[in-house]
């Protein structure tokens, strides 16, 4: 799971369907980003954003490096 994604809310992430994903790779086990397939994101503000904000988790479907769907 990639954390600290750069979207403030799941709604904002959904507004970026059709665009490339902005993210920060945080896995200690190597890169998790794939340009095709399912990605699992988490926004954990208590870990990565001193201003706080809402926590959310999302499943993102990528096709050719573009956000196709957000669940």
Image: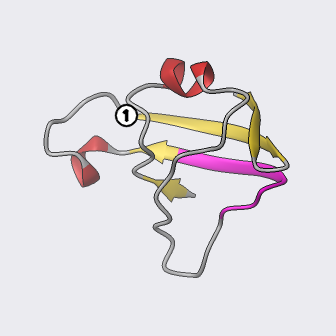
Q: Name the quarter where the C terminus is drawn.
A: top right
The quarter of the picture where the N terminus appears is bottom right
Residue 7, image quadrant: top left
Task: Choose top left, top right, bottom left or bottom right for residue 8.
Answer: top left
User: Which corner quadrant of the image does residue 61 belong to?
Assistant: top right
Model colouring: secondary structure
Give left or right: position of 31 versus 18.
left
- Measured as percent of width and height from the top left, residue 43 is found at 41, 42
Q: Residue 41 in the image: x percent, y percent?
A: 56, 46
Q: Which residue is at a point 14% across and 37% down the rendered structure image?
A: 51
Q: Is residue 65 left or right of residue 29?
A: right
What number of labels is visible? 1
Q: What residue is shown at x 70% (from left), y 50% (from top)? A: 39
Residue 56 image point, x, y percent: 45, 33
**69 vs 21: above or below:** above
Q: Does 2 lie within the magenta span?
A: no
Q: Which SS class for mark 1?
A: loop
Q: Which residue is mark 1?
A: 55
Could you say where residue 13 lies in the image, as x and y percent from the top left?
55, 28
**Magenta span of residues:** 33-41
Q: Residue furthest left?
A: 50
Q: Residue at x 37, y 34 (%)?
A: 55
Q: In the picture provided, is 65 more to the left or to the right than 31?
A: right
Name the foreground residue: 67 vs 71.
67
Question: Quick check: 58 above or below 12?
Answer: below
Front residue of 32 and 63: 63
């Amino acid at each position: 799971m990639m954390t600290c994604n750069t979207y403030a809310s799941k709604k904002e992430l959904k507004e970026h369907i059709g665009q490339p994903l902005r993210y920060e790779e945080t896995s200690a086990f190597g890169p998790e980003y794939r340009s095709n397939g399912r990605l699992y994101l988490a926004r954990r503000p208590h870990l990565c954003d001193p201003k706080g904000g809402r926590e959310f988790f999302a499943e993102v479907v990528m096709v050719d490096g573009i956000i196709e769907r957000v669940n």
